[in-house]
Amino acid sequence: MEKRALDGDIKKVLYSEEAIRAKVKEIGAEICRDYRNRKVLMVGILNGCFPFIADLVRAIDAPIEVDFMSVSSYGGGMQSSGVVRILKDLNKTIVGRHVLLVEDIIDTGLTGRYLLENLQTRHPASLEVCSLLDKRDARAEEVPIRYVGFDCPLEFVVGYGLDYDGLYRNLPYIGVLKEEVYTHR
Ligand code: IMP
C-alpha cells in the first residue's frame, strides 16, 4: 500500500481500503436485489457519508435517486451532544418514496433516531437505514439498521468520511488515531 502523509497519525487500521471496497460491493448487490421492483431514493447524511455513498451508488446497477441532508450533532469533538440540528434539508418531498438513509456510522443512535422520526412524519412508502459502521455497544437509542457494513468496536474512528475535528475524512481506510494526536491539538 502506498504511504500517505496522514498515515503517521494512525495507531491501527480497522478496515482497509480493500475490505471497504469488497463490503460496499456486497451491500450494493443486496440493495439492488431488495429494491428490484421499487425505485429507491438514497438519502445521504452529510458530511460523513460522502465517500461511502459515492462508492455505494456505483455498486448499484439499477435506477436510483440521491438526495442529501446535513445534520450536526457533535460540536467538533468526540462526544454526541444529543441535540440534532438540520443544517440542510432534502431538496424534494419523499411522500410515497422508498427512502434509504445512508450513514457513515451509527454510534449512540441519537442522530439516526431523530432522522427516522423526522422522515417518518413525511409519509415515505418505506424507510430503511444503511450504515457502513455500527458501533452497537455505544447505543443509547434503538435504530433498526437494514444494511450494515462492519460492527465497529467502542473506539473513535477516522477515515473514509469520518473525521476528527474536520480532519482525516480523506483517508481511504478507517482507523484509530494515536493518542498524541488528541493531546497535541
Ligand atoms: P450518533 O452518536 O449515532 O448520533 O452519531 C452521530 C454522528 O457522529 C455520526 O454520523 C458521525 O458523523 C459521528 N461519529 C460517531 N462516532 C464516530 C467516530 O467514531 N468517529 C467519527 N465520527 C463519529
Image (tube, helix red, strand yellow):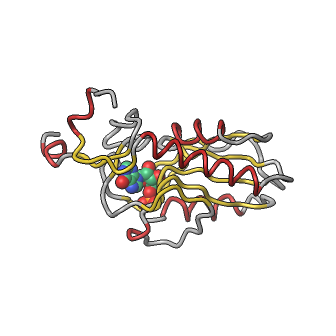
User: Which is more toward the observer, 95 or 162?
Assistant: 162
x%, y% of residue 118?
64, 60
Point 47% across, 57% down: residue? 150
Is 155 displayed left or right of 107 in the figure?
left
x%, y% of residue 85?
50, 51
| Residue 112 found in image quarter | bottom right
User: Which is more toward the observer, 63 or 96?
Assistant: 63
Q: How many marks?
A: 0
With respect to residue 163, does 79 lie above or below?
A: below
x%, y% of residue 148?
55, 59
With respect to residue 127, does 13 lie above or below?
A: above
Is 61 displayed left or right of 37 in the figure?
left
Q: Is residue 83 visible?
A: no
User: Which is more toward the observer, 178 or 47?
Assistant: 178
- What is the quadrant of the N terminus in the image? top left
Q: Residue furthest right?
A: 37
Is 177 displayed left or right of 50 in the figure?
left
Is 45 displayed left or right of 13 in the figure?
right
Q: Is residue 27 visible?
A: yes
Point 26% across, 34% down: residue? 7
- What is the quadrant of the C terminus in the image? top left
x%, y% of residue 175?
32, 47
Q: Quadrant of ligand 1?
A: bottom left
Point 48% across, 45% down: residue? 20
